[in-house]
Amino acid sequence: MSEKDITEKVLMSHNDVFADVINGLVFKGEQKVKSFDLGNEVVHAQYKASDEVIHEEERDVAKYWETQSVKIAMFGVENQTNVDSYMPLRVIGYDGAVYKEQLSMANEKFYPVVTIVLYFGTDRRWNGKKNLKSYFDIPDGLEKYVNDYKIHVFEIAWLTEEELAYFHSDFKVVANFFVNKRKNKDYIPDDETEIEHVDEVLKLLTVMTGDRRYERILSKGDGKEVRRMCDVAERLEQMGIEKGLKEGISQGISQGISQGIKEARTVDIAILKSLKKGMTIEEISKGQDVELEEVRKIAEALMEE
């Protein structure tokens, strides 16, 4: 499993974040799903097909919604940073595996499965297929007999201000970040919303943006002091200053060495010219304002060349 997959799943595994995503996107901000009504669902759904082989489907994150210990629905969340042209086929496989599992367990009461796709891309909108029928060239007369299956894709970086207001957990911070990142590639976080799961949010931003500075904030121990994205901005600025100082010092040393070599070479040439004119070492030392012993060493080295 990739680092990106693991990081996305860790943040979404928190019930407060998961419930917030479902309430914000599915129920348009209405607080229907409570975090304490969510239970972890295994992401590995197994079923036996006609070939008598056990097959397995693995989701990103899945939780069941229950009241009074009775399951009333199961929610699955799939995270995408790139457009997956086969997403409808994947989702129908995930959902079908859960329904198959319910059937095999002979449940007295079946519950619906709802899968949503969170797309975090900022360079382009989702332009992949969103329904099963879009893959087929259906012969005339079969259209009404071919069942369709649609997926629900939410483009996080294109959420409106009204939609962002639906969220109340750390997901609001993440969504706000990607909305601003889409509008401005050089966006510096300025969100003052307090973060509950700092470690998970910063690691998510690291893998989703490729900017390792967010992760370094944690490794330096500053993560304990970071409570808001504006705090993150201060750390990033400090990192920039420190980097500039290091580069400046390194560049200064390099330039100093280069200048020193250039000046030393200039003195060597002047001494060589003076020797060719027949001047004594004493006269050259006085004329070039160089110690007598130093002139003698340079003269000997030049004569050996």
Image (cartoon, rainbow, N blue to C red):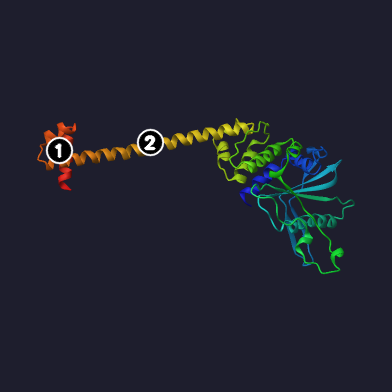
Q: Residue at x 76, y 58 (%)?
A: 93
Residue 221 appears anywhere in the view: no
Q: Position of residue 15 (x, y in %)?
A: 75, 40
Q: Residue at x 70, y 39 (%)?
A: 171
In depth, the one of 285 and 55 nearer the eye is: 285
* Amino acid type indicated by mark 1: Arg
In depth, the one of 147 and 57 nearer the eye is: 147
Answer left or right for 71 relative to 21: right
- Nearest-to-viewer mark from 1 and 2: 2
Between discs 1 and 2, the one toward the N terminus: 2
Residue count near mark 2 (Cα–Cα under 10 Å), binned few <14, some 14–19, many ≥20: few
* Amino acid type indicated by mark 2: Gly
Q: Position of residue 143 (x, y in %)?
A: 84, 65
Q: Quadrant of residue 219?
A: top right
Q: Residue at x 81, y 56 (%)?
A: 101
Q: CA distance from mark 1 to mark 2?
A: 31 Å
Answer left or right for 299 relative to 132: left
Q: Position of residue 118 (x, y in %)?
A: 72, 47
Q: Secondary structure at mark 1?
A: helix
Answer left or right for 75 relative to 200: right
Q: From the viewer's perspective, is residue 10 above or below residue 285?
A: below
- CB within 8 Å, label 1 to label 2: no
Q: Position of residue 230 (x, y in %)?
A: 62, 32
Please tell me how many numbered marks the rendered image carries.
2
Residue position for label 2: 252
Q: Which mark is residue 296?
A: 1
